[in-house]
Amino acid sequence: MQLPARIGKYELVEYLGGGMSQVYRAQDTVLGRIVALKILTEQGNADGEVRARFLQEARMAGNITHDNIISVYDFGEERGRQLMVMEILRGESLREAIKGNRTGDLQDKLNTALQIARALEYIHARKIIHRDIKPENIHIEPSGKVKLMDFGIAKTEGLSLTRAGFTLGTPYYMAPEQVMGHQLTNLVDVYAFGVMFSELLSGQKPISGETVERIFDQILHEPLNLEALRHQGVTQQVINLIERCTAKNPADRPQSFTAVALELERIVNGGSTSLFPAASGAPAAQPSAVPKIFAKLPPKLQTQNWIMALSAGGVIVLLGIVFLIGWLVVIAVGGGGTH
């Protein structure tokens, strides 16, 4: 499409990329805001499966409101082609950031992983499985805020838009059960997250292979290659989390992103304040910020939310005791006055 062009109330000013759908930077001439306009191509529009998936993406993303998920403003049809209006994002994809070594320091990387886990926790709570978690579908804004994108092959419970015999997903990040075409659960996203988390930390994919067949063989029969993490001195606690997320048996993985996010928080705020051990001669890690009175609690109760809840409970109990003492004093004084 030659630019500038106009579709409905949207003035298209820049082509941003795409495949079966094309994305443009556009201006809403009524509201005056800059948006991303995603338009289904003629080829995609003629394919009933692609059209249905495009509509599914719009409905799913349009009903989601979360700081770490791209916002969809509108959906419609113009000149016989479906279009979706989304927030315009600044920054770059996680893939571009990894390639350019712009993922920041270790704390930045952990924060990125935690934001992704929270976004996936949110959609899983709404019975949505993304099924295509990969660096290309994670956007990082200049502020460091993460945005989960592309619900084109996401699936809700009871809904299937997959052609028989056709597996959806990007090979390097597909779970064994996804490769085998088995019934999928939210645990395929946990697996893909683990692969991507390893790549985020090391800059290298833990699965190699130049053919889909070789990649699938590794996914099904070989452990992930995490040597790049070990060579960089990543702590065993982090490696253990990645190994659990990418377990070949879904039952051996963390069963929710709530558990994954809690473990990520624990890595920093619990037993370790850094993803990496301090180098020789480096200052020792600062002690945990957990107050001593809570230090003997189980680690899972040493998070900020639990400490706030326990503190509030303690205050309520203390106020109850003060009220009871006051009530007893009133009774005693009142009883003494009757003689």
Image (tube, rainbow, N blue to C red):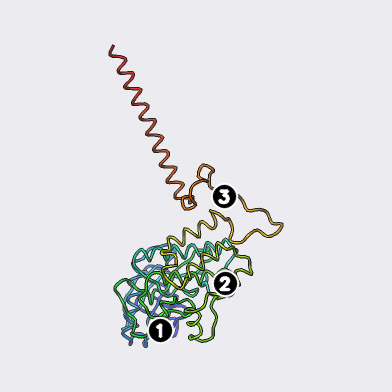
Tell me whether the residue at label 3 lies in contact with that at label 2, contact meaning CB atoms closer than 8 angstroms.
Answer: no
Q: Residues within 10 Å of mark 2 (few under 14, many from 20)?
A: many
How many marks are shown on the rendered structure? 3
Q: Residue at x 28, y 11 (%)?
A: 339
Looking at the picture, does residue 120 appear above or below residue 327?
Answer: below
Given residues 275 and 31, the one toward you in this image is: 275
Q: Count neighbours of disc 3 (C-alpha within 10 A) and say few if under 14, some if 14 to 19, many if 20 or more.
A: some
Where residue 68 sits: x, y (%)? 44, 64
| Rendered view: 307 above or below 15 | above
The residue that disc 1 covers is 20
Closer to the chain start, of discs 2 and 1, is 1
Say whether residue 279 is left or right of residue 62.
Answer: right
Secondary structure at badge 2 equals: loop
Relative to 109, 119 lies left or right: left
Is residue 226 rendered to the left or right of residue 26? right
Q: Which comes before the other along the chain, label 3 or label 1?
A: 1
Along the viewing direction, whichever of 243 and 64 lies nearer the viewer: 243
Q: CA distance from mark 3 to mark 1?
A: 50 Å
Query: Residue 159, position in %: x, y?
Result: 30, 75
The residue to which callout 2 is attached is: 226
On screen, residue 284 above or below 82? above
Q: Quadrant of residue 321?
A: top left
Name the front one of labels 2 and 1: 2
For the residue marked with disc 3, what is the amino acid?
Ser
Question: Amino acid type of disc 2?
Answer: Leu
Residue at the extreme right: 281
Q: Nearer the viewer, residue 252 or 198?
A: 252
Residue type (three-letter) at the residue carrying disc 1: Met
* Mark pair 3, 2: CA separation: 28 Å
Mark 1 crowdedness (10 Å alpha carbons): few <14, some 14-19, many ≥20: some
Q: Which residue is mark 3?
A: 288
